Amino acid sequence: MDRHVPIIRFFLYNTGMPITTIFFDLDDTLYPASSGVWKMIKARMTVYMHDRIGIPWEDIPTLREKYFSEYGTTLRGLQAHYPVDMDDYLSFVHDIPLEEHLRPDEKLRAMFEALPAHKLIFTNADSGHALRTVTALGVQSCFEAIVDIRAMDPYCKPMRQAFEIAMRVAGEQDPHRCVLVDDLASTTRAAQDFGFYSILFGQDGNHAKNESNARLSQLMDLPAVLKGL
Protein backbone atom coordinates (compact mmCIF):
# COMPACT_ATOMS: atom_id res chain seq x y z
CA MET A 1 0.00 0.00 0.00
CA ASP A 2 1.28 3.49 -0.86
CA ARG A 3 2.40 5.30 2.29
CA HIS A 4 0.68 8.53 1.30
CA VAL A 5 -2.77 6.94 1.00
CA PRO A 6 -4.85 7.91 4.06
CA ILE A 7 -6.40 5.08 6.05
CA ILE A 8 -10.12 5.38 6.79
CA ARG A 9 -11.60 2.98 9.31
CA PHE A 10 -15.05 1.81 8.31
CA PHE A 11 -17.76 0.74 10.75
CA LEU A 12 -20.79 -1.33 9.99
CA TYR A 13 -24.19 0.31 9.97
CA ASN A 14 -25.74 0.73 13.46
CA THR A 15 -23.42 -1.83 15.10
CA GLY A 16 -20.22 0.13 15.74
CA MET A 17 -18.28 -2.97 14.66
CA PRO A 18 -15.36 -2.55 12.28
CA ILE A 19 -15.52 -4.05 8.81
CA THR A 20 -12.69 -6.55 8.58
CA THR A 21 -13.43 -8.40 5.32
CA ILE A 22 -14.87 -7.37 1.96
CA PHE A 23 -15.92 -10.06 -0.51
CA PHE A 24 -16.09 -9.10 -4.18
CA ASP A 25 -17.95 -10.91 -6.90
CA LEU A 26 -15.95 -11.25 -10.11
CA ASP A 27 -17.81 -11.16 -13.43
CA ASP A 28 -19.69 -7.93 -14.20
CA THR A 29 -18.51 -6.55 -10.85
CA LEU A 30 -14.75 -6.03 -11.03
CA TYR A 31 -15.13 -4.98 -14.66
CA PRO A 32 -18.02 -3.18 -16.40
CA ALA A 33 -20.72 -5.21 -18.13
CA SER A 34 -20.00 -3.17 -21.26
CA SER A 35 -16.71 -5.06 -21.67
CA GLY A 36 -18.63 -7.98 -23.16
CA VAL A 37 -16.76 -10.60 -21.12
CA TRP A 38 -19.80 -12.10 -19.42
CA LYS A 39 -21.69 -12.09 -22.73
CA MET A 40 -18.92 -14.25 -24.22
CA ILE A 41 -19.02 -16.62 -21.24
CA LYS A 42 -22.78 -17.05 -21.58
CA ALA A 43 -22.37 -17.78 -25.28
CA ARG A 44 -19.82 -20.48 -24.45
CA MET A 45 -22.27 -21.99 -21.93
CA THR A 46 -24.89 -22.24 -24.67
CA VAL A 47 -22.46 -23.93 -27.05
CA TYR A 48 -21.39 -26.36 -24.31
CA MET A 49 -24.98 -27.34 -23.56
CA HIS A 50 -25.61 -28.08 -27.23
CA ASP A 51 -22.30 -29.56 -28.37
CA ARG A 52 -21.20 -31.45 -25.25
CA ILE A 53 -24.56 -32.49 -23.81
CA GLY A 54 -26.79 -32.53 -26.87
CA ILE A 55 -29.52 -30.19 -25.67
CA PRO A 56 -31.48 -28.68 -28.59
CA TRP A 57 -30.70 -25.04 -29.25
CA GLU A 58 -34.31 -23.99 -28.75
CA ASP A 59 -34.48 -25.55 -25.27
CA ILE A 60 -31.31 -23.96 -23.90
CA PRO A 61 -32.56 -20.44 -22.97
CA THR A 62 -35.43 -21.83 -20.88
CA LEU A 63 -33.22 -24.45 -19.24
CA ARG A 64 -30.52 -21.93 -18.37
CA GLU A 65 -33.06 -19.64 -16.71
CA LYS A 66 -34.61 -22.58 -14.85
CA TYR A 67 -31.24 -23.89 -13.62
CA PHE A 68 -30.09 -20.45 -12.51
CA SER A 69 -33.31 -19.92 -10.57
CA GLU A 70 -33.39 -23.37 -8.96
CA TYR A 71 -29.69 -24.18 -8.47
CA GLY A 72 -27.86 -20.85 -8.40
CA THR A 73 -25.75 -21.55 -11.50
CA THR A 74 -26.15 -23.24 -14.86
CA LEU A 75 -23.38 -25.65 -13.88
CA ARG A 76 -25.10 -26.86 -10.72
CA GLY A 77 -28.31 -27.41 -12.67
CA LEU A 78 -26.52 -29.37 -15.38
CA GLN A 79 -24.74 -31.48 -12.76
CA ALA A 80 -28.10 -32.34 -11.21
CA HIS A 81 -29.53 -33.62 -14.51
CA TYR A 82 -26.60 -34.71 -16.71
CA PRO A 83 -23.21 -36.45 -16.26
CA VAL A 84 -21.26 -33.19 -16.54
CA ASP A 85 -17.55 -33.05 -15.77
CA MET A 86 -17.03 -29.81 -13.83
CA ASP A 87 -13.44 -29.30 -14.97
CA ASP A 88 -14.38 -29.79 -18.62
CA TYR A 89 -17.30 -27.36 -18.30
CA LEU A 90 -15.30 -24.65 -16.54
CA SER A 91 -12.41 -24.95 -18.97
CA PHE A 92 -14.76 -24.69 -21.96
CA VAL A 93 -16.92 -21.75 -20.86
CA HIS A 94 -13.96 -19.65 -19.69
CA ASP A 95 -11.92 -20.20 -22.86
CA ILE A 96 -12.26 -16.58 -23.98
CA PRO A 97 -9.71 -13.86 -24.93
CA LEU A 98 -9.91 -11.88 -21.68
CA GLU A 99 -6.85 -9.77 -22.45
CA GLU A 100 -8.56 -8.36 -25.54
CA HIS A 101 -11.36 -6.91 -23.44
CA LEU A 102 -9.82 -5.98 -20.08
CA ARG A 103 -6.94 -3.63 -19.38
CA PRO A 104 -4.96 -2.76 -16.22
CA ASP A 105 -6.80 -0.15 -14.17
CA GLU A 106 -4.45 1.81 -11.92
CA LYS A 107 -7.24 3.82 -10.29
CA LEU A 108 -9.10 0.64 -9.41
CA ARG A 109 -5.95 -0.89 -7.94
CA ALA A 110 -5.27 2.21 -5.83
CA MET A 111 -8.84 2.17 -4.53
CA PHE A 112 -8.59 -1.49 -3.53
CA GLU A 113 -5.23 -0.96 -1.84
CA ALA A 114 -6.60 1.92 0.23
CA LEU A 115 -9.46 -0.14 1.68
CA PRO A 116 -8.43 -1.09 5.26
CA ALA A 117 -9.90 -4.59 5.22
CA HIS A 118 -9.13 -8.09 4.00
CA LYS A 119 -10.29 -8.46 0.40
CA LEU A 120 -11.28 -11.75 -1.25
CA ILE A 121 -12.83 -12.75 -4.56
CA PHE A 122 -16.08 -14.70 -4.01
CA THR A 123 -17.24 -16.13 -7.32
CA ASN A 124 -19.26 -18.92 -8.88
CA ALA A 125 -16.57 -19.10 -11.56
CA ASP A 126 -13.35 -21.07 -11.07
CA SER A 127 -10.09 -19.76 -9.66
CA GLY A 128 -8.30 -20.00 -13.00
CA HIS A 129 -10.75 -17.61 -14.65
CA ALA A 130 -10.70 -15.37 -11.58
CA LEU A 131 -6.91 -15.17 -11.57
CA ARG A 132 -6.80 -14.39 -15.29
CA THR A 133 -9.38 -11.65 -14.76
CA VAL A 134 -7.68 -9.88 -11.85
CA THR A 135 -4.34 -10.19 -13.64
CA ALA A 136 -5.76 -8.59 -16.78
CA LEU A 137 -7.08 -5.74 -14.59
CA GLY A 138 -3.74 -5.43 -12.79
CA VAL A 139 -5.30 -5.93 -9.35
CA GLN A 140 -4.16 -9.47 -8.53
CA SER A 141 -2.02 -8.28 -5.60
CA CYS A 142 -5.05 -6.65 -3.93
CA PHE A 143 -6.78 -9.93 -3.01
CA GLU A 144 -5.74 -12.41 -0.37
CA ALA A 145 -7.71 -15.39 -1.65
CA ILE A 146 -10.25 -16.60 -4.19
CA VAL A 147 -13.33 -18.46 -2.97
CA ASP A 148 -14.42 -20.18 -6.17
CA ILE A 149 -16.95 -22.77 -7.32
CA ARG A 150 -14.60 -25.63 -6.43
CA ALA A 151 -14.08 -24.32 -2.90
CA MET A 152 -17.86 -24.14 -2.49
CA ASP A 153 -18.54 -27.58 -4.03
CA PRO A 154 -21.28 -28.87 -4.00
CA TYR A 155 -22.77 -25.45 -3.18
CA CYS A 156 -22.64 -22.03 -4.83
CA LYS A 157 -23.85 -18.51 -4.23
CA PRO A 158 -26.52 -17.65 -3.10
CA MET A 159 -26.71 -20.78 -0.90
CA ARG A 160 -26.14 -20.23 2.82
CA GLN A 161 -23.42 -22.89 2.86
CA ALA A 162 -21.43 -20.87 0.33
CA PHE A 163 -21.30 -17.92 2.71
CA GLU A 164 -20.20 -20.21 5.54
CA ILE A 165 -17.36 -21.53 3.39
CA ALA A 166 -16.33 -18.01 2.38
CA MET A 167 -16.13 -16.99 6.02
CA ARG A 168 -13.96 -20.00 6.87
CA VAL A 169 -11.59 -19.17 4.02
CA ALA A 170 -11.39 -15.57 5.24
CA GLY A 171 -10.88 -16.63 8.84
CA GLU A 172 -13.96 -14.68 9.92
CA GLN A 173 -16.18 -15.58 12.85
CA ASP A 174 -18.83 -12.85 12.68
CA PRO A 175 -20.77 -12.17 9.45
CA HIS A 176 -21.54 -8.65 10.67
CA ARG A 177 -17.89 -7.77 10.08
CA CYS A 178 -18.21 -8.69 6.39
CA VAL A 179 -19.30 -6.83 3.28
CA LEU A 180 -20.27 -8.36 -0.06
CA VAL A 181 -20.28 -6.46 -3.35
CA ASP A 182 -22.19 -8.38 -6.05
CA ASP A 183 -24.17 -7.61 -9.19
CA LEU A 184 -26.95 -10.13 -8.55
CA ALA A 185 -29.85 -9.19 -6.29
CA SER A 186 -30.46 -12.83 -5.38
CA THR A 187 -26.94 -12.99 -3.94
CA THR A 188 -27.00 -9.64 -2.11
CA ARG A 189 -30.36 -10.55 -0.62
CA ALA A 190 -29.00 -13.89 0.60
CA ALA A 191 -25.88 -12.18 1.96
CA GLN A 192 -28.02 -9.67 3.84
CA ASP A 193 -30.09 -12.48 5.34
CA PHE A 194 -26.87 -14.25 6.36
CA GLY A 195 -25.64 -11.19 8.24
CA PHE A 196 -23.32 -9.53 5.72
CA TYR A 197 -23.65 -5.88 4.76
CA SER A 198 -24.55 -6.34 1.10
CA ILE A 199 -24.02 -3.89 -1.74
CA LEU A 200 -25.83 -4.42 -5.03
CA PHE A 201 -23.58 -3.30 -7.87
CA GLY A 202 -24.44 -2.01 -11.31
CA GLN A 203 -28.22 -2.35 -11.22
CA ASP A 204 -30.37 0.18 -13.07
CA GLY A 205 -33.64 1.49 -11.71
CA ASN A 206 -35.13 1.08 -8.27
CA HIS A 207 -34.45 -1.93 -6.09
CA ALA A 208 -36.50 -3.43 -3.33
CA LYS A 209 -35.41 -2.68 0.21
CA ASN A 210 -34.86 -6.37 0.96
CA GLU A 211 -32.46 -6.93 -1.96
CA SER A 212 -29.43 -5.25 -0.39
CA ASN A 213 -28.30 -2.76 2.22
CA ALA A 214 -26.96 -0.36 -0.39
CA ARG A 215 -26.50 0.17 -4.13
CA LEU A 216 -23.39 1.02 -6.09
CA SER A 217 -23.28 2.04 -9.75
CA GLN A 218 -19.55 2.78 -9.97
CA LEU A 219 -17.00 0.58 -8.20
CA MET A 220 -14.77 3.58 -7.59
CA ASP A 221 -17.51 4.99 -5.34
CA LEU A 222 -17.19 2.07 -2.90
CA PRO A 223 -15.10 3.99 -0.30
CA ALA A 224 -17.77 6.70 -0.15
CA VAL A 225 -20.53 4.11 0.32
CA LEU A 226 -18.58 2.45 3.12
CA LYS A 227 -17.84 5.77 4.81
CA GLY A 228 -21.54 6.54 4.71
CA LEU A 229 -22.41 3.50 6.80
Image: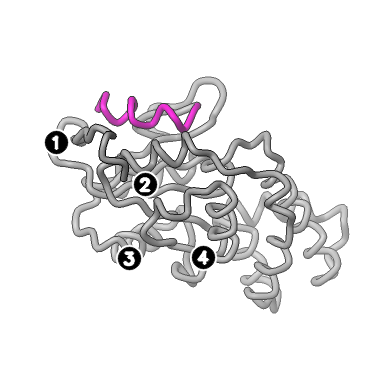
Classify mark 1: residues with Cα within 10 Å, few (<14), some (14-19) or many (20+).
few
Residue type of the residue flagged with mark 3: Val
Q: Nearer the viewer, mark 2 or mark 3?
A: 3
Above or below, 167 relative to 117: below
Going from N to C along the chain, the mark reached first, 1 or 2, is 1
CA gap between label 4 and label 2 equals 17 Å
Q: Which residue is mark 2?
A: 191
Going from N to C along the chain, the mark reached first, 3 or 1, is 1
CB under 8 Å between discs 3 and 1: no
Q: Secondary structure at mark 3?
A: helix
Q: Which quadrant: the N terminus?
A: top left
Q: Which residue is mark 1?
A: 15
CA gap between label 3 and label 1 equals 24 Å
**Colour setup of the view:** one colour
Q: Which residues are magenta?
A: 218-229
Q: Looking at the image, which residue is at 57% across and 55% down?
A: 70
State which quadrant residue 93 falls in. bottom right
Above or below, 29 relative to 136: above
The front one of 160 and 52 is: 52
Residue type of the residue flagged with mark 4: Ile
Tell me if 209 is positioned left or right of 44 in this view: left
Classify mark 4: residues with Cα within 10 Å, few (<14), some (14-19) or many (20+).
many
Going from N to C along the chain, the mark reached first, 3 or 4, is 4
State which quadrant residue 45 falls in. bottom right
Q: Secondary structure at mark 4?
A: helix
Q: Looking at the image, which residue is at 33% across and 25% down?
A: 224
Of all residues, the one furthest to the top in this rendering is: 205
CB under 8 Å between discs 3 and 4: no
Going from N to C along the chain, the mark reached first, 2 or 3, is 3
